[in-house]
Image (spheres, rainbow, N blue to C red):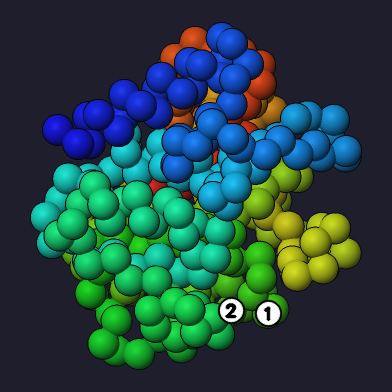
Amino acid sequence: MNIIKEQRKCLNLLNLFSTEDKFVCCVCKNPNGKQIGYSHTGRKRYLCRCGARERQRGLLFLILFFTEICNQKDTNLIHTSPAFELSLIKLIKSLNPSINYITSDIKDKNCDILLDLINVPDEHLNNYNYVINIHVLEHIRKKKDVYTVISNIYSMLKDGGKAIIAVPQDFNLDVDILEDPNADPNPDHWRKFGSKFVNLLDKFTKVEIVFDTNFDVIKKKLVRDNMQYKDLLLNTSRSSKSYVDGQVFYICYK
């Protein structure tokens, strides 16, 4: 019942944003969110004081409507490098008290464990129902290690487990990886990922693509490449403003 109530709250806040241009963060429900503008796009974007941005709000929609994370008892989940998802994690734990929600990072000691995804110890293999890996792959220095990390994420899952993966993507690039540290203005990013990023996930038995389908440039590329996709916002009517931005999430099945 708590899950259904949370789903309704998220949909109501999305509708409030779309119809009345009023922003309330669906993660913390605080009406005093802080609006920030991104000058290189001209679009208004919203950063809440709880730390949630469009990407985190999108991840909440994904978890609530496209996974069993909040319903499944005794779920074993590891969330890698979750620095921007802390308020979201607190919410998920409250919705599913039985979940074993582990956070990890290669150097952040505030996480539950320190874990190098390039060299994963055997104890983590075949151990998780879910692995969440959001905006991590662009920070890995060597290209060959990107493939290693994706393979290790697969190996960390139990049979039937799912990984949630997302990266910053430029859908105007018809490549899987653009290996150029100067291509992205963020100095911590070693590469850009293009519209064919999904090709890197071919180790998985099935991959679902989920995003806000109001973003036509993404939709057109996926249609061109005969890729199936789902609408993150459940085909609800909404304005051209984006509550969750153009983040594409990949649900990858083992």
Outermost left residue: 73
Amino acid, disc 2 = Asp
Classify 10 Å Cα crowding around label 2: few (below 14), some (14-19), many (20 and above): some
Q: Residue at x 36, y 63 (%)?
A: 131
Q: Which mark is residue 145?
A: 2
Q: Residue at x 40, y 65 (%)?
A: 79
Question: Could you tell me residue 97's position as x and y percent?
Answer: 18, 57
The residue under label 1 is 142
Q: Residue at x 88, y 64 (%)?
A: 182
Who is closer to the viewer here, 172 or 119?
119
Q: Is residue 188 visible?
A: yes
Quadrant of the image containing the N terminus = top left
The reply to whether callout 1 and callout 2 are in contact (CB within 8 Å) is yes
Q: Which mark is residue 177?
A: none
Amino acid, disc 1 = Lys
- Direction from residue 121 to residue 143 in the image, left or right: right
Q: CA distance from mark 1 to mark 2?
A: 5 Å
Per the image, label 1 sits on a secondary structure element best described as loop
